[in-house]
Amino acid sequence: QVQLVESGGGLVQAGGSLRLSCAASGSAFNISTMGWYRQAPGKQRDLVAYITGAGSTNYMDSVKGRFTISRDNAKNTGYLQINSLKPEDTAVYYCYAQRSTPLGLRTYWGQGTQVTVSS
């Protein structure tokens, strides 16, 4: 099993920045892709960004140029740097990690961290 613990959310004014962290523990080896989803009230959960084990990244269009995903494999930790925050970025942000197992690819989820952007 892999446990993911997010941190770094909070209340920030529009234009501000936050850095979200996602620390993996347990059987946190052979983790391949790590990423972040977000879910605003009454809306579906959307994929925000992900980073592969090789370091390739991908972002949803609305966050390109403002969000940066990274990871520190030695610390089994992923990060999401969020700059130029907008009120529409308000959501619960969930990190996930994928790991290959003998039974196939498994996905693990964090508990979520709230990001609230005031205008």
Image: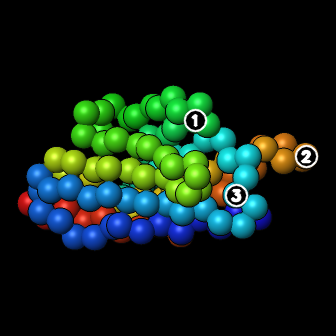
The kind of residue tagged 1 is Thr
Q: Earlier in the sequence, mark 1 or mark 3?
A: 3
Pointers 1 and 3 in contact (C-beta within 8 Å): no
Give the residue displayed 28% in from the left and 70% down from the top: 10
How far from the left and from the top, in percent, is residue 99?
73, 47
Mark 1 element type = loop
Give the residue displayed 25% in from the left and 65% down from the top: 116
Please name the residue that numbered disc 2 is placed on.
102
Please say which color scheme the image uses: rainbow
How far from the left and from the top, in percent, is residue 55?
53, 33
Give the residue displayed 43% in from the left and 52% down from the top: 79
Observer able to see residue 90: no
Above/below status of 61 relative to 8: above
Observer able to see residue 59: yes
Q: Earlier in the sequence, mark 1 or mark 2?
A: 1
Location of the C terminus by quadrant is: bottom left
Location of residue 42 (image quadrant): bottom left
Q: Earlier in the sequence, mark 2 or mark 3?
A: 3
- Which one is closest to the eye, mark 2 or mark 3? 3
* In front of the other: 27 or 82: 27
* In front of the other: 43 or 61: 61
Mark 2 element type = loop
The kind of residue tagged 2 is Pro
Above/below status of 105 relative to 26: above
Dot 3 surroundings within 10 Å: few (below 14), some, or many (20 or more)? Answer: many
How far from the left and from the top, in percent, is residue 29?
73, 52
Please name the residue that numbered disc 1 is placed on.
52
Please name the residue that numbered disc 3 is placed on.
28
Mark 3 element type = loop
